[in-house]
Image (cartoon, rainbow, N blue to C red):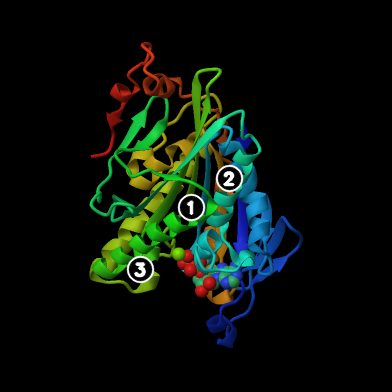
Amino acid sequence: MSNITVCARFRPLSSRERSNHGDSVCVHGIDTETFVFKDEKEEDFSFSFDRVFYEKSEQVEVYEFLVLPIVQDAVNAINGTIITYGQTGAGKTYSMEGPSVLECDELKQGLLQRAANGLFECIKSTEGSVKHTIKLSMVEIYMEKVRDLFDLSKDNIQIKESRVQGILLSGVTEIAISGPADALQRLSSGIANRAVGETQMNMASSRSHCIYIFTIQQELAKEKRVKSGKLVLVDLAGSEKVEKTGAEGRVLEEAKTINKSLSALGNVINALTCGSPGKTNHIPYRDSKLTRILQDALGGNSRTALLCCCSPSSSNASESLSTLRFGTRAKHIKASPRPLCNEDHYAKNHGASHATKDDSMERILNK
Ligand code: ADP
Ligand code: MG
């Protein structure tokens, strides 16, 4: 059992924050793990995380600390999940995608591009002995509906649970990826589909949760086994409070739905961390699509990392404090990932007679 990795990242001051005279930087770094945060009332709060990335930190530092170890495990059939959390404008998407998935200089490449490269680097080192296949799916959760970003006609994907493979998205498009360049093209087309949705529905990307799923399958021909690992990256919707946004109508409905799913995430984290030893308490995964999809990641069978993204400005101090408190609670979640050895899948693909009907074990859990 190990705790999930929780890091904080402060972006540089935005030009608006810089030009606003009332604004000041409210983060005072002590070292790479600890800082003092000053709230609007000048009260000091001390925080410590597995690592703190201050405004000058580079994308590669975040990748190497938070994501690379999880990428290396995913290739060995251990599931991994990386989540970015924080208010709108705090740097979640920048951390994930960089300024743009396709067109950005290497230095600014986000966790997504680096993870895709990393996966292919890792499998290169095992070439010859094991056959790997990498597939990509992309979905977003908008107004409690899971939409397939590779096929917009699939706009209400059901969440199922399989005995062998854990939580699954029923019928989601999975695209086989041939290499890092192909991965970037596919990611970019999925993200563009998200943008199409935006203009049609007049929604900003920060109003939905975006989930990138890489499935890495290893065929161990000698042992007649297929092992698979999932690497899931989640760019959450903005965590700001509804009252502050002055929202009305549809925007208010969106904000309420987001707050509900992020509250559900907070409740799951509370339930996971507040249980008394030896007792299994109820974990409310089913309270939202987000928590259902993240059940494996939070419930133990995944290596999980959380990046709490914050503005360094005093004008956003209360939202940043709430993000940092969320991260502090999450530090206490324990995880014990186990490799998934999906023998049934191999058997089915190779016509063996002992194939078990894993599919029949699937139950539709969310209507
Ligand atoms: P979010 O996804 O949390 O709503 P974004 O990632 O879109 O926020 O970031 C908001 C703005 O701040 C963007 O213009 C982005 O380019 C910029 N930004 C965020 N983080 C950084 C960073 N670490 N370095 C430079 N610019 C950043
Ligand atoms: Mg964003």
Using residue 365 as the reference point, say whether residue 187 is left or right of it.
Answer: right
The picture quadrant where one finds residue 123 is top right
Between circles 3 and 1, the one closer to the viewer is 1
Label whose residue precedes the other's in the sequence (2 or 1)? 2
Tag 2 near tag 1, CB within 8 Å:
yes
Using residue 229 as the reference point, say whether residue 167 is left or right of it.
Answer: left
Between circles 2 and 3, the one closer to the viewer is 2
Q: Position of residue 270 (x, y in %)?
A: 48, 43
Q: Position of residue 301 (x, y in %)?
A: 51, 32
**Amino acid identity at mark 2:** Phe
Label whose residue precedes the other's in the sequence (3 or 1)? 1
Q: Position of residue 365 (x, y in %)?
A: 28, 34
Q: Position of residue 101 (x, y in %)?
A: 50, 63
In three-dimensional space, the C-alpha distance between marks 2 and 1, rounded to whole angstroms, equals 10 Å
In three-dimensional space, the C-alpha distance between marks 3 and 1, rounded to whole angstroms, equals 24 Å
**Amino acid identity at mark 3:** Ala
Which residue matches tag 2? 120
Using residue 187 as the reference point, say whether residue 112 is left or right of it.
Answer: right
* Residue at horizontal 48 percent and vertical 52 percent from the top: 183
**Amino acid identity at mark 1:** Ala
**Badge 2: how crowded within 10 Å, few (<14), some, or many (20+)?**
many
Q: Is mark 3 within 8 Å of ligand 2?
A: no
Q: Quadrant of the N terminus?
A: top right
Tag 2 near tag 3, CB within 8 Å:
no
Q: Which mark is residue 204?
A: 3
Secondary structure of the residue carrying numbered label 1: helix
Which residue matches tag 1? 183
